[in-house]
Image (cartoon, helix red, strand yellow):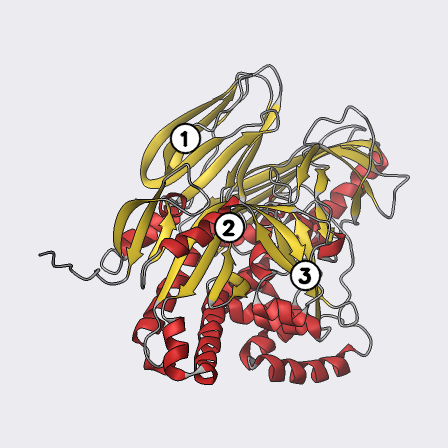
């Protein structure tokens, strides 16, 4: 073997799991590199001329010895990914790592390839033995554990040994578990949470998303969130706030408390400024309390596909390069961007979409052009621009499992358990595309006269409790009550519509609340400003004002929605699926305070309006 000669190592594994089942585990390069025995890495700065998207990295333990520049990962979900490192210091000159999952009749043929160039002949022999006998065995052992979990339809931690807890944590866990069951009344979820803390790997616990676990556990989202919030109050868990970059979608900034959060932020990866948005990029995340289990702050990889599960492909294209990525997409909407363009293309994926799609990258800016493509399109991407670039396609709804600040900060559980967790009094934070719901009782005055104050107040308070429960179950929060009215906030419009539908059904038909309440509602969707008012989160702006005027204009048992709400794709889909339930009428309304304009609104009812006889 000659000095400076490239080595090529190829491993092949036959697995019964499909590429889609394997991808979440083999694409998690942070976990894979840790399993292979790589030391932790950290970001450094080697040059002012590092290309956008590339990373300068070093080993934590060997900072003065091994440093390299890492090109952007390239991947095609769920089939393949690769990365290349160019070393500046150390015993290697160059390294490339490639993984491919090839579908077979029996499952998957997984191929791993490593290309590397050692700096001298002594290192060459040592590296060859280390890769062929040690790294291959470690990777194979990891795949066996993954396949075992996949075959049993469980997560890998559920077939693993318990992890080390902090000294004295076992005794604390017994006490906290009993208290948590008493507070939440949800023994099954508490048991699953304790197992997660005991058995999951560090990487699984660094950022825990309760809604994602609820989906996997088959539990209601608001119930799992309730357990997590109570667990935080009892020091079993701790929470913090991620503020993700809107371009790369990575949690570039994290804050322990809302009052510590900064509005104006910077993304190192995108090299651009961005702002905190209460309804779009600020999420509540959890991890074990450090007195129960300490999660080390170590990274083994920064740029792999596992760090961006919302990104289905990422490709580097030099000038005049063409790529033909293999795609397997879910129905939905995707965004195509590049590192050199501010704009984007919007791709709608449908079963009957276009099969052959050619995308040409030029120096002209993308302008939000839209195209409908099939789930498995023949896609070609050509770089006709004057610069090399990185092109990627992201899911539009990239954080459906996230708990957004707008929904949780006004939830009854959160405000009762953490009354001081709010914004600074001087902060004014944007909340984009937030949904505002106002409800009001039509017959409350009649109720007070007929039943007397004591009985009426009891019934009205009972009505508030029912609304609180429904709003929480539909991923919303009660901002405040005003007399007999409720102001609630939701992450998306369809959740507000579902909530009102359930309220109407209960108050119109249930004998549990006595004589039927005559509830009406108004829903609007748009941008707001979030503030701390009297120690609680509140919202101001035109969107709030319009929603409050819509409920004023609504009739008995009517849901008055704005055109923005009605035209939202998810609302349209829900109304179409329930066309026998909803009766919609379009009209023009003049709203108080908006004297110079008329609003096109939809009046929605759950029953046909009564016929009027005109004589």
Q: Quadrant of the C terminus?
A: bottom left
The 10 Å Cα crowd at callout 3, few under 14, some 14 to 19, many 20 or more, is: few
Precedes in sequence: disc 3 or disc 1:
1
Residue 518 located left or right of residue 181: left
What is the secondary structure assignment of the residue under circle 1?
strand
User: Which residue is more in the foreground, 70 or 528?
Assistant: 528
Q: Label 3 belongs to which residue? A: 534
Q: Nearer the viewer, mark 3 or mark 1?
A: 3
Query: At 46% across and 63% down in the image, what residue appears?
Result: 474
What is the secondary structure assignment of the residue under circle 2?
helix
User: Which residue is more in the foreground, 393 or 460?
Assistant: 460
Residue 453, placed above or below residue 96 = below
Query: At 55% across and 63% down in the image, what residue appears?
Result: 480
User: Which residue is more in the foreground, 380 or 607?
Assistant: 607
Measured as percent of width and height from the top left, residue 370 is found at 41, 30
Query: At 39% across and 34% down in the image, what residue appears?
Result: 377
Measured as percent of width and height from the top left, residue 114 is found at 66, 39
Residue 318 located left or right of residue 450: right
Residue positioned most to the right = 64
Which disc, if any, is residue 370? 1
What is the secondary structure assignment of the residue under circle 3?
loop
Q: CA distance from mark 3 to mark 1?
A: 45 Å
Measured as percent of width and height from the top left, residue 609 is found at 22, 60
Measured as percent of width and height from the top left, residue 317 is found at 58, 24
Res 81 quadrant in image: top right
Q: Label 2 belongs to which residue? A: 544
């Amino acid at each position: 073997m000659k000095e400076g000669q490239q080595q090529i190592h190829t491993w092949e594994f036959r697995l019964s799991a499909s590429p889609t089942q394997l991808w979440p585990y083999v694409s998690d390069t942070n976990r894979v590199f840790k399993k292979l025995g790589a030391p932790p890495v950290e970001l450094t700065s080697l040059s002012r001329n590092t290309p956008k998207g590339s990373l300068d990295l070093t080993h934590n333990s060997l900072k003065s010895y091994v440093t390299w520049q890492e090109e952007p990962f390239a991947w095609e979900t769920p089939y393949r990914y690769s990365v290349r490192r160019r070393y500046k210091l150390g015993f290697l000159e160059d390294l490339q790592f490639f993984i491919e999952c090839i579908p077979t009749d029996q499952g998957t043929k997984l191929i791993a390839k490593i290309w590397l160039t050692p700096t001298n002949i002594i290192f060459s022999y040592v590296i060859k033995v280390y890769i062929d006998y040690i790294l291959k065995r470690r990777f194979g052992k990891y795949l066996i554990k993954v396949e075992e979990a996949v075959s049993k339809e469980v997560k890998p931690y559920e077939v693993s040994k318990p992890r080390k807890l902090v000294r004295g944590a076992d005794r604390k866990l017994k006490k906290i578990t009993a208290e948590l069951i008493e507070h939440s009344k949800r023994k099954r979820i508490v048991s699953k949470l304790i197992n997660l803390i005991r058995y999951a790997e560090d990487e699984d616990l660094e950022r825990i998303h309760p809604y994602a676990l609820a989906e996997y556990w088959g539990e209601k989202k608001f119930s799992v969130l309730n357990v997590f919030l109570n667990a935080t109050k009892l020091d079993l868990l701790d929470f913090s706030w991620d503020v993700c970059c809107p371009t790369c979608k990575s949690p570039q900034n994290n804050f322990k408390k809302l009052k510590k959060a900064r509005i104006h932020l910077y993304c190192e990866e995108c090299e651009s400024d961005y702002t905190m948005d209460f309804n779009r990029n600020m999420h509540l995340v959890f991890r074990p309390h450090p007195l129960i289990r300490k999660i080390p702050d170590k990274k083994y990889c920064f740029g792999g596909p596992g760090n961006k599960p919302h990104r289905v492909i990422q490709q580097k294209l030099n000038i005049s390069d063409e790529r033909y990525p293999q795609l397997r997409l879910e129905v939905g909407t995707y965004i195509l961007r590049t590192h050199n363009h501010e704009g984007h293309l919007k791709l709608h994926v449908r079963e009957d979409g276009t099969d052959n799609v050619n995308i040409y990258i030029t120096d002209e800016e993308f302008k939000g052009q839209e195209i409908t493509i099939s789930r498995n399109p023949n896609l070609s991407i050509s770089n006709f621009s004057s610069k090399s670039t990185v092109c990627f396609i992201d899911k539009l709804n990239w954080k459906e499992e996230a708990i957004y600040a707008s929904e949780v900060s006004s939830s009854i559980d959160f405000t009762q358990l953490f009354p001081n967790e709010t914004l600074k009094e001087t902060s004014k934070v944007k909340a984009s595309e937030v949904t505002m719901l106002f409800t009001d009782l039509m017959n409350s005055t009649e109720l007070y006269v007929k039943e007397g104050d004591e009985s009426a107040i009891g019934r009205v308070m009972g009505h508030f409790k029912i609304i609180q429960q429904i709003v929480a179950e539909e991923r919303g929060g009660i901002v405040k009550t005003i007399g007999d009215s409720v102001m609630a906030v939701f992450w998306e419009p369809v959740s507000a519509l579902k909530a009102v539908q359930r309220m109407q059904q209960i108050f119109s038909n249930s004998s549990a609340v006595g004589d039927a309440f005559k509830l009406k509602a108004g829903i609007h969707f748009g941008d707001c400003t979030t503030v701390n008012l009297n120690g609680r989160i509140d919202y101001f702006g035109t969107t709030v004002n319009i929603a409050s005027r819509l409920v004023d204009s609504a009739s008995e048992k009517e849901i008055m929605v704005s055109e923005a709400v009605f035209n939202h794709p998810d609302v349209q889909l829900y109304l179409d699926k329930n066309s026998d339930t909803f009766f919609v009428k379009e009209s023009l309304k003049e709203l108080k305070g908006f004297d110079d304009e008329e609003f096109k609104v939809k009046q929605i009812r759950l029953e046909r309006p009564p016929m009027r006889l005109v004589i």
